[in-house]
Amino acid sequence: MRRNLTYLVAVAAMLSVATGWSFLQETATGLRVVQTAKAFVTTLSDDEKAITVLPPASPQRVDWHVIPKAQRKGLQLKQMSDTQRQAALALLRSVLSQTGYDKAVLVMALEETIGELEKVRGGRAIRDPDRYYFTLFGEPSEVGRWGLSIEGHHLSLNFVIDNGRVIASTPLFLAANPTVVRKGMPGSVAEGTRVLAEEELLAFRLWESLDEPQRKAALLDAKAPRDLRAAGQPQPPAYSPDGLATTAMNDAQQQLLQELIAVYTGNLPADLASTRWREIAEAGYDKVYFAWAGADRPGLGHYYRIQGPTFLIEFANTQSDSAGNAACHIHSVWRDPRGDFAVPAKRD
């Protein structure tokens, strides 16, 4: 177990070196986000700014969800000029790694595929790759605290910046419908694209590596839950540490689990990812659990969660995609049991 703790700290250190900053210092990402947010705000008219830059204490700060909604907070891409759109996408890029940015852009682009498929099936929900909203909570500044939300169907990114440092990056929700773009599906996303491939395939590899006693410990239920728990709620659910403890895994299984966690941390810039790894290590890797529910193969509903004192990952693939293919519709999220949005969670 000591070897794994050393591994996690080493990963955090390497990521920090890659950014040129110690993970104990102010993050490079925070300063970059401040500058791109300021640039975005300068493109807004007074009327646009009134709906885009809201008070820091606005209750809309923690009002998040990824379901199709007729109205959301903020200014949507569809309403932006080309200059504003470029500034907004630069802001999106500033809070994510290249990998995370590519996933987010594909999640948006899949709205076209969903919309065309649902027209054939008689669907009426609004599906639009430009229906993604940007909201700031407070004026972006190197001094003081302010927040950022980028959200729409199947995407919710939430950040809090305090004195030029990103101090919160949850909830961070990404989804994929369809899981795999199949031959003949409409839209601009290329055939064979699998937006959240590693999130699913690595988890199956880990599950398949478990022996029967380990599976018995990890299995929550033979049937997967319909969806993630507490989606849209201001704070994550207070789970007990159910499932299989890392202490009950062999070295190869622990390595697979770390690779799976790294898929999620890898959506963020390297300095923010290193902070997440450091927090996991400091809280105790031996306090991390892996839990599973549902089928043990693709095509049938399955679910997993990975939880430690500082993070909660949930993944569900139980719904059909918009073409009707079973279990081809992924929801995934990273949350903070200590409190999302930099708001301390209230626990009984």
Image: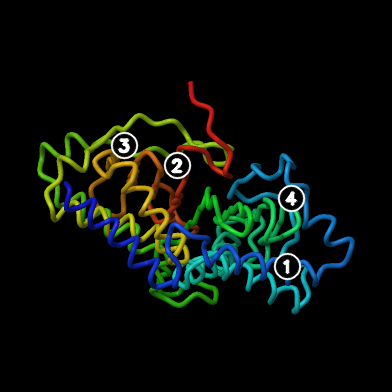
Residue 95 location, quadrant: bottom right
Q: Is label 4 in a helix, a strand or a loop?
A: loop
Tell me whether the residue at label 1 lies in contact with that at label 3, contact meaning CB atoms closer than 8 angstroms.
no
Any part of residue 71 in sight: yes
Q: Report which quarter residue 193 is drawn in.
A: bottom left
| Position of 4 relative to 13 (above/below) | above
Residue 291 can be seen in this image: no
Q: Residue at x 63, y 72 (%)?
A: 89
Label 4, on which residue? 71
N-terminal of the two: label 2 or label 1? 1
Asked if residue 202 is positioned above or below residue 102 in the image, the reply reads above
Residue closer to the observer: 188 or 275? 275
* Chain-order first, disc 4 or disc 3: 4
Between tags 1 and 4, which lies in front? 1
Circle 1 sits in a helix, a strand or a loop, which is it? Answer: helix
Which label's residue is closer to the chain start, 1 or 3?
A: 1
Q: How far apart are marks 1 and 3 (CA)?
A: 47 Å
Q: Distance between the residues labelled 4 and 3?
A: 34 Å
* Element assignment for label 2: loop
- Which residue type carries mark 1? Lys
Q: x%, y% of residue 33? A: 62, 65
How far apart are labels 3 and 2 at the CA level?
Answer: 12 Å
Q: How far apart are marks 1 and 4 (CA)?
A: 25 Å
**Quarter-wise, where is residue 77 in the image?**
bottom right
- Camera-side residue: 310 or 21? 21
**Disc nearer the start of the sequence (4/2):** 4
Residue under label 1, please give it. 38
Decide: few, some or many residues near mark 1? Use Cα within 10 Å; few <14, some 14-19, many ≥20: some
User: What residue is rendered at 65% in x and 56% in y?
Assistant: 148
Q: Residue 227 carries which label?
A: 2
Contact, mark 1 vs mark 4 (Cβ under 8 Å): no
Q: Earlier in the sequence, mark 1 or mark 4?
A: 1
